[in-house]
Image (tube, grey):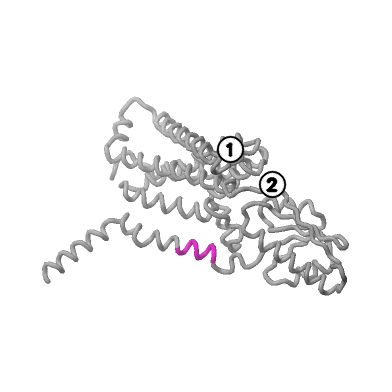
């Protein structure tokens, strides 16, 4: 019994000394629980945001419906623009006895509930009118061609893949080189620091572009059916800026961490929550408002949106302005912190 107790105590002490194992055992499962609870808790998905243009019995019935967040517009142009950007579930234009419903014919989970709510409102208005045949006629029309799920999955998961590769490769390389005294030798060699950094950054950028080519090629196979927009090439500068941003994250992580195990834990701690909250795997349009405010600070969220706009939605160069500015600003800020914490050898 004494031997059993001693061995158990020794094994327990060894296990808690391994910080990476502790993180994988306790923290990461807990992190996923918290993230999903925040995203899907607190009434997420309990209401749909519908815009209305005009007035009448259908609009009145829709305003009284449970689970509907009604937004009024004077004209349909602004409402349709917000619908295309994913800020609305549907747009209802009420003119006389006609009810025109526009919706996004894509992989948006709120579309079906929104159409159901409008249909219920039309039925309620017709019941109140007591006309035969029914007075109000509902006409549905998508604002875009039907998109397969691969159209929405590709930009987000590609952005996540590029971010993960940039963070892990730069962080692991920095820690390994420091532990093996490679950085110290480079410091003494007739090689400038800028040359070392730009060479590593060039490699990371090349890997990101190869990732994109392979990823898009596989997604474009007939079995998946990805269809790129005419302005797909605008994704290239976005990929480069995204690589710069997450390369700087990797450099900061590698500067702070001392071992490869701690780098893996820290990098996962940064990238995975950012991917979940930034919409890389599923849309977070219906998340609580305070979560949306937080996600707007995440560079991966803006990279996801920019990639979706240029690869799928067919938007032009204007779609790069906000995500490009966010990624560039993030790169500058994080690079400053990475430079402050950088060291040539372990303490």
Q: Which residues are magenta?
A: 33-40
- Residue 150 on the magenta span: no
Residue 33, quarter of picture: bottom left
Cα–Cα span, label 2 and label 1: 21 Å
Residue at 68% x, 58% y is 89
Residue 38 lies in the magenta-colored region: yes
Is 190 in front, or is 206? 206
| Residue identified by numbered label 2 | 145
- Quarter of the image with the C terminus is top left
* Lateral position of residue 137 relative to residue 229, left or right: right
- Judged by its main secondary structure, the magenta piece is helix
Q: Label 1: few (<14), some or many (≥20) within 10 Å?
A: many
- Give the residue furthest to the left: 2
Q: In the rendering, which numbered label is found on residue 171?
A: none
The residue tagged 1 is: 235
Of the image marks 2 and 1, the number of the one nearer the N terminus: 2
Left/right placement of residue 168 relative to residue 116 reads left
Q: Nearer the viewer, mark 2 or mark 1?
A: 2
Q: Give the percent coordinates (x, y) of residue 287.
A: 58, 61
User: Residue 80 at what x, y percent from top left?
Assistant: 74, 52
């Amino acid at each position: 019994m004494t031997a059993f107790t001693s061995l158990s105590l020794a094994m327990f002490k060894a296990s808690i000394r391994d910080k990476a194992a502790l993180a994988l055992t306790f923290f990461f499962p807990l992190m996923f629980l918290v993230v999903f609870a925040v995203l899907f808790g607190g009434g997420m998905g309990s209401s749909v945001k519908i815009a209305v243009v005009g007035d009448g019995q259908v609009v009145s019935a829709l305003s009284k419906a449970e689970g509907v967040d009604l937004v009024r517009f004077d004209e349909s142009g602004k409402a349709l623009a917000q619908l295309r950007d994913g800020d609305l579930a549907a747009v209802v234009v009420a003119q006389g006895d006609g009810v025109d419903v526009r919706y996004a014919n894509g992989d948006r989970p709120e579309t079906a509930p929104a159409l159901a709510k409008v249909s219920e409102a039309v039925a309620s208005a017709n019941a109140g009118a007591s006309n035969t045949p029914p007075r109000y006629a509902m006409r549905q029309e998508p604002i875009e061609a039907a998109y397969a799920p691969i159209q929405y999955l590709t930009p987000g998961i590609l952005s996540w893949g590029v971010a993960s590769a940039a963070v892990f490769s730069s962080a692991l390389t920095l820690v390994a080189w420091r532990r093996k005294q490679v950085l110290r030798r480079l410091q003494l060699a007739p090689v400038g620091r800028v040359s070392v950094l730009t060479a590593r950054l060039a490699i990371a950028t090349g890997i990101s572009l190869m990732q994109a080519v392979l990823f898009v090629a596989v997604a474009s196979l007939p079995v998946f059916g990805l269809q790129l927009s005419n302005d797909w090439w605008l994704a290239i500068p976005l990929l480069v800026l995204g690589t710069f941003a997450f390369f700087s994250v990797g450099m900061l992580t590698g500067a702070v961490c001392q071992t490869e195990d701690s780098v893996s834990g820290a990098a996962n701690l940064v990238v995975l929550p950012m991917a979940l909250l930034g919409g890389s795997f599923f849309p977070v349009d219906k998340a609580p408002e305070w979560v949306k405010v937080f996600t707007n600070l995440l560079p991966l969220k803006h990279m996801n949106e920019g990639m979706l706009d240029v690869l799928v939605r067919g938007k032009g160069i204007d779609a790069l302005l906000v995500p490009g500015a966010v990624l560039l600003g993030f790169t500058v800020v994080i690079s400053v912190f990475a430079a402050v914490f950088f060291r040539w050898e372990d303490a």
